[in-house]
C-alpha cells in the first residue's frame, strides 16, 4: 500500500524519500538502495504544499506501483525540502513602494543586496519603471526571477521570462509564486538564439548545454510588448537576429547587456531595424545595459 506525507513551505530544492517495508519486491524500475529507503531529487514544484500522489511519484521515479499493493507490505512517499529557507523561517522579505516583497531561498554574492532590503540591480529596474511603458515585458535571462518579480509588481500588466537553466527557472517560479504573481508572470524554459541549437553554457556548470530557439518561433503572434530586457551572457546579438519579425511587429524598447565591445550588438540591431541610442541604463560595473530602439521611434 502507498502512503503520502505532504510537506508545506517554500524551498529552492526538494527530494522524494521512499521508505518500503519490503524493498526487494518494489524495485521493478530501479533497485532501492540503502536497505529500505531512497532519496531522489525531484524537479516538480517545491513550494506551497508539494505532494503529488504517491502513485504518480512512484511512476515518475520509475517504480512499479503494483509491487506495493500487497497489504502485507507498504511504501511511504515523503517530500523533503532541501537547502533553502522555509516559509515562516528566514525567508527574506522587505517593503518597497508600499508592497511586501518576498524571496525564496538564500542570497549571496551580487544577489546579497536582497538581504539588505534592495532589489538586485535596483537602479536599473527603477530606470525601466520610470519609462512608464505598461503592456507586456520580456525578461530574457530571468535567472532566479528578481527582474521578473519587479516588472510584475511595478511595471507591466504581463511578464514573460525566459530561463533555460532548470534550477534557476524553478527558483524564479518560486519567487514569482511567493509574490502572488503567477497569474501575470510566466517563466518559459527556452534559451534564445538565431537558430534552433544546443549552446554551451559553462556558467551553469561544466558541459551544460542550453536548448535554444528563435524568438520568432517561440512567440510568433504576440503583440503588445513594450519592453525587452536581455541579459544572456553574450548571446544578445543572436537573440536579436532570431526575433526580427517579433521586433518589427512590436517595436519595444530593448535593454541589452554588452560584454566587451558593442559593435556586434549594434550590427545585429541594424539587421532588425534597430539602433543603439547611446543611452546606457544604470548597470552592474562591467556589464553595461545598452538601450536599443526601433528606427521608426524617435529619441
Image (tube, rainbow, N blue to C red):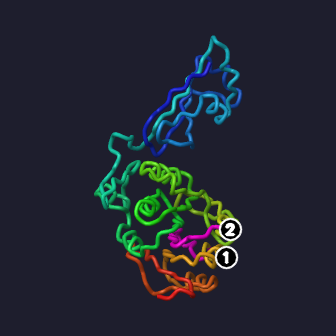
Residue extending furthest toward the top: 72
Q: Residues within 10 Å of mark 2 (few under 14, many from 20)?
A: few
Which span is picked out in magenta?
Answer: 221-238
Taking the spot 44% from the left edge, 35% from the top edge, the residue there is 8
SS at mark 2 in the image: loop
Q: Is residue 256 above or below residue 177?
A: below
Taking the spot 61% from the left edge, 63% from the top edge, the residue there is 191
Nearer to me, 4 or 150 = 150
Task: Name the spot of residue 278 as percent of width and height, x first.
Answer: 45, 87
Taking the spot 35% from the left edge, 46% from the top edge, the residue there is 91
Taking the spot 49% from the left edge, 63% from the top edge, the residue there is 157
Q: Is residue 51 above or below residue 246?
A: above
Nearer to me, 56 or 202 = 56
The residue that label 2 is drawn on is: 220
Nearer to me, 173 or 183 = 183
Task: Name the spot of residue 51 as percent of width and height, x first.
Answer: 54, 33
The residue that label 1 is drawn on is: 245
Task: Name the spot of residue 228 as percent of width and height, x first.
Answer: 52, 71
Classify the position of the N terminus by image quarter: top right
Task: Name the spot of residue 102 as percent of width and height, x first.
Answer: 37, 51
- How many labels, in total? 2
Please check the rendered image and state whether residue 282 is part of the magenta-colored stretch, yes or no: no
SS at mark 1 in the image: helix
The answer to whether the residues at label 2 and label 1 have Cβ atoms under 8 Å apart is yes
Q: Is residue 6 above or below residue 95?
A: above
Please check the rendered image and state whether residue 233 is part of the magenta-colored stretch, yes or no: yes
Q: Residues within 10 Å of mark 1 (few under 14, many from 20)?
A: some
Q: Earlier in the sequence, mark 2 or mark 1?
A: 2
Q: CA distance from mark 2 to mark 1?
A: 8 Å
Amino acid at each position: 500500500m502507498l502512503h503520502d506525507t505532504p510537506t508545506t513551505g517554500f524551498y529552492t530544492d526538494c527530494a522524494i524519500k521512499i521508505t518500503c517495508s519490503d524493498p526487494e519486491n518494489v524495485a521493478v524500475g530501479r533497485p532501492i538502495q540503502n536497505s529500505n529507503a531512497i532519496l531522489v531529487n525531484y524537479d516538480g514544484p517545491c513550494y506551497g504544499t508539494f505532494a503529488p500522489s504517491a502513485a504518480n511519484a512512484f511512476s515518475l521515479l520509475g517504480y512499479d506501483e503494483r509491487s506495493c499493493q500487497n497489504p502485507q507490505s507498504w511504501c511511504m512517499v515523503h517530500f523533503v525540502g532541501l537547502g533553502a529557507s522555509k516559509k515562516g523561517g528566514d525567508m527574506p522579505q522587505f517593503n518597497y513602494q508600499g508592497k511586501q516583497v518576498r524571496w525564496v531561498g538564500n542570497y549571496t554574492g551580487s544577489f546579497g543586496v536582497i538581504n539588505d532590503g534592495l532589489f538586485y540591480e535596483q537602479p536599473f529596474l527603477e530606470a525601466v519603471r520610470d519609462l512608464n511603458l505598461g503592456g507586456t515585458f520580456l525578461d530574457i535571462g530571468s535567472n532566479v526571477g528578481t527582474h521578473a518579480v519587479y516588472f510584475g509588481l511595478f511595471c507591466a500588466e504581463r511578464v514573460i521570462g525566459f530561463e533555460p537553466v532548470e534550477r534557476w527557472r524553478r527558483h524564479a517560479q518560486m519567487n514569482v509564486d511567493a509574490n502572488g504573481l503567477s497569474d501575470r508572470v510566466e517563466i518559459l524554459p527556452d534559451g534564445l538564439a538565431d537558430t534552433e541549437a544546443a549552446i554551451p553554457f559553462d556558467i551553469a556548470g561544466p558541459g551544460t548545454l542550453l536548448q535554444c530557439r528563435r524568438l520568432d518561433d517561440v512567440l510568433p503572434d504576440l503583440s503588445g510588448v513594450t519592453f525587452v530586457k536581455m541579459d544572456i551572457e553574450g548571446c544578445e546579438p543572436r537573440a536579436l537576429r532570431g526575433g526580427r519579425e517579433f521586433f518589427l511587429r512590436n517595436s519595444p524598447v530593448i535593454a541589452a547587456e554588452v560584454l566587451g565591445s558593442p559593435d556586434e550588438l549594434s550590427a545585429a540591431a541594424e539587421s532588425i531595424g534597430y539602433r543603439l541610442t547611446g543611452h546606457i541604463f544604470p548597470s552592474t560595473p562591467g556589464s553595461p545595459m545598452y538601450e536599443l530602439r526601433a528606427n521608426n521611434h524617435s529619441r
